Image (tube, coloured by chain):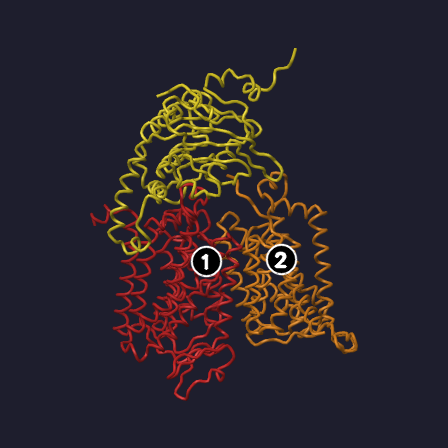
Chain colours: A yellow, B orange, C red
Amino acid sequence: MFSKLVSISSGAMVPDRDADKSPILECIGLGVTFGGLKAVENFNLTIGRTEIAGLIGPNGAGKTTVFNLLTKVYQPTKGTILLDGRDTHGMSTTQVNRAGIARTFQNIRLFTNLTVEDNVKVGMNNAMRYNMWSGIFRLPGFWKEEKVAHERAMELLSIFDMQDMANARAGSLPYGAQRRLEIVRALATNPGLLLLDEPAAGMNPSETAELMENIRKIRDTFQIAVLLIEHDMNLVMNICEGICVLNFGQIIAKGSPEEIQSNATVVEAYLGKKKEA
Amino acid sequence: MTILSNLISGISLGSIYAIIALGYTMVYGIAKMLNFAHGDVIMVGGYLCFCTTSYLGWHPLPAVLLAIVGCTVLGIVVERLAYKPLRSAPSLAVLITAIGVSYFLQNAALLLWGSDPKVFPAFFSFSGQSGVALLGGQLNITYVAMITVTVCLVIMLALTTFTGHTKMGKAMRAVSEDKGAAQLMGIDVNFTISMTFAIGSGLAAIAGVLLCSTYPTLMPTTGSMPGIKAFTAAVFGGIGSTPGALLGGLLLGVIQIFAQAYVSTQLSDAIVFAVLIVVLLVKPTGLLGRQVREKV
Amino acid sequence: MEKLKRMAPSTRSSFITYGMVIVAYAVMEALLSGGLLKSSLKGLLVPICAYVVMAVSLNLTVGIMGELSLGHAGFMSVGAFTAVIAAAALESTVTSGPVRLAVSMAIGGVAAGLVSLIVVVPVLRLQGDYLAIVTLAFGEIIKNIINCVYVGLDGEGFHFGMKDAASLGLAADGKMLLQGPMGAVGIQKLSSFTAGFLLILLTLAVALNFIHSRAGRAVMALRDNRIAAESVGISPSRYKMMAFVTSAVLAGLAGGLYAMNFSSILAKKFDFNTSILILVFVVLGGMGNIRGSVIAAAALTVLPELLRDFSDYRMLVYAIVLILVMLFTNNPACKTVFARFKLGSPAKKEAV
């Protein structure tokens, strides 16, 4: 399901299969300043309904800051974020998630003292309806919804073959499993757009290959868009349809993997300028 | 004129709070723990001074010095025995241990000196006068108040110079920023923490003498309420900040005296705490506290 | 036994906790009917129950929500004095003692819950030590205010005042209920060990079921990682409020039980030191460990009584025991041993 980028009415590029649908995310002139320092400036990005997009750039380029702006961990000082055509201005992190963005974190942030299954169930919290009293007095609503939640948690964990670990404490999992659990937890919130912050960090090549397959599988099964930050160029070039390169808080290139690989500015940003002979 | 005289008692009481709050703030800054036993060190200081002057007939000056030395040693010993083994324990475990130390000191004092209040001798009266009358007797400033405010200012200046310009002071600041990094730079973290406790406890002894001179009843629980108030003052000003402790202490003292004088004696504590809550709602990290942003 | 093994670990653990409490109650009742209990211990039974409830409810705030509260006794105080007044008012309408106890405790619980709705405002805004100091401040404010309130009851109804007993203008047949710094007087002793036992069961059910429901998971998620919890759509204020108010209501119930065990009670009884005492139970029992709170509260309330042989040295020994227990439970070598008994190692394992 790898398709070519085509331009849509706004002039942005999305995969051709998403061209007839409205994009899931549009950032227009997004920017943030921290005490005079422009961490991200004039950030424009459009992501198609089922696109796998990559956000790359050297260390300190502002990639994670973009994620923090999208999820409102930081409030943007400039620009607009349209999620599914809806302006997220003034929303909190919680509201943005309910509107359809879920994410993972570069430095893993699990609920370490909860079990693996409970971590996933926390992600389903907003899909559940029973109130505090049903919980305390164990009314029928509690049993019904908890049963559904248990089954769905197991189903989601099975994407990464993690059903056996359901009762383990999340903090006790090995590193790779923790990263995968974060993805499952994010998926549990039923997002339209999944943000993955360095999902392959610390993984060996075979684990990375497996992760790549799973990201594709997730996109295909849930029909959602994925935006990922990654330093593993092999992964990025293999699964991303559109790539956006950031340096010093500004976009220096956008396009398909082939275009990015042959872009002189990108090469310069990563490897430095060639000395003029 | 009563306003002025209330203001002076407020500043005087606030100076005592500030000196105690400094101890809280220094220990918090470095060991990241709330030393609940700090208030009881004040009480110990008071009793030491009381015993040497009343029972042994010492001159106040060596008595105060002995109280300072005694409390400094007590601070170091308590830190070594009770807090040092818990360096890597969760902060609440250390808090409970500090509470245990506080119970211990209070009950030890109860056994040693009994529960009946002792009347602290008036050190600061010269030629039979406890203060000077100004403006034709309308305003009376006690010597205790003058000495308290002076001592507080001297301590503040000395501490600022010490932490800013001496090797030990810099080591303290380094340890409070990052223990691990400080250790890698060759700073003896344990020694630095011990020194902080020593200074904090020495200050508590001074505060104890000043407190008992202002309010001359001495009981095993004498230190706990001023301790809580000073802790409040430290948070009020922004815990970890030295000028914050001074500001918080002074404000707390003034608010308390004014509330006592103009609203209600019984409700004065409630008013002090209510002001604290309002201030924290507006400035969640205290008046001069630093806002730390979590990195995501 | 087979069935016990097949249960989810959390369910099994909950049942062990209930079982333990029921067995303890049965043993105590047997000792009581056999006349084997010293009168000093007998007098402790209701306070033990109240402290167990206090410890479990504080554990909701400190262990489950992860916020240090130094003013939990304030809610106990509100519950206690409201319940005492309610019990006096209901004396003629509700004649059955146990029913009146239950109703007035419930009123006390609701009152504590209402007060907690004010306290929750800073709880949602502040964090860490700043929040701790605010809870401490609230506890002291509540104590101070109750110390100034005078309440009397006569044929015309309630009389309130802030000045003194005389200014209430009570009729000749009137009765003083709350006398400012003298506290509540003339309380009918309605509390019983059985009532305390039932309150513990209710508290355990509320606390454990809360923890193992979606609200409890959300609160623990916020404790473990606030930003991650928000990123999966958990609203911090909503769930923190639930946990905090639940905890306050339970403390109010405990206050009612406690107060109606004595003929008079002072506001000073519920001061900062009581808050600290309950916090000690929670930390020693293990943060987030409900069973640990029950055991620690019961054991530490009985301990000073058992140390009676040390007479004057009693509280000194108590302090030393407290320090030594903290040093040992946090010593890496001893930790593994304690972990086996699920005691004293805070927040390292799944909450029970």
Task: Residue under label 1, please give it.
Answer: C120
Pointer 2 with pointer 1, Cβ within 8 A? no
Q: Is residue B29 above or below residue A169?
A: below
Extreme residue toward the left, this view: C2
Q: Quadrant of residue B281?
A: bottom right
* Disc 1 secondary structure class: helix
Q: Residue A200 at what x, y percent from top left?
A: 43, 28
User: Which x, y percent locates residue C203?
Assistant: 33, 60
Left or right, residue B239 beside residue B97: right
Q: Residue furthest bottom?
A: C172
Front residue of B82/A243: it is A243
Q: Mark 2 points at which residue?
A: B23
Residue B254 drawn above or below residue B189: below
Chain holding disc 1:
C
- Identify which amino acid the numbered label 1 is placed on: Val
Q: Which of A143 and C196 is in front in this view?
A: A143
Q: Do labels 2 and 1 share a chain?
A: no
- For disc 2, the neighbor class at 10 Å (few under 14, some 14 to 19, many from 20) is many
Task: Name the chain letter of the residue that bears numbered label 2.
Answer: B
* Amino acid carrying mark 2 in the image: Gly
Q: Nearer the viewer, residue C127 or A203?
A: C127
Q: Nearer the viewer, mark 2 or mark 1?
A: 1
Residue appearing at x 58%, y 64% in the figure: B229
Check disc 2 and report its element: helix, strand or loop: helix
Left or right: A57, with A131 as reference point: right
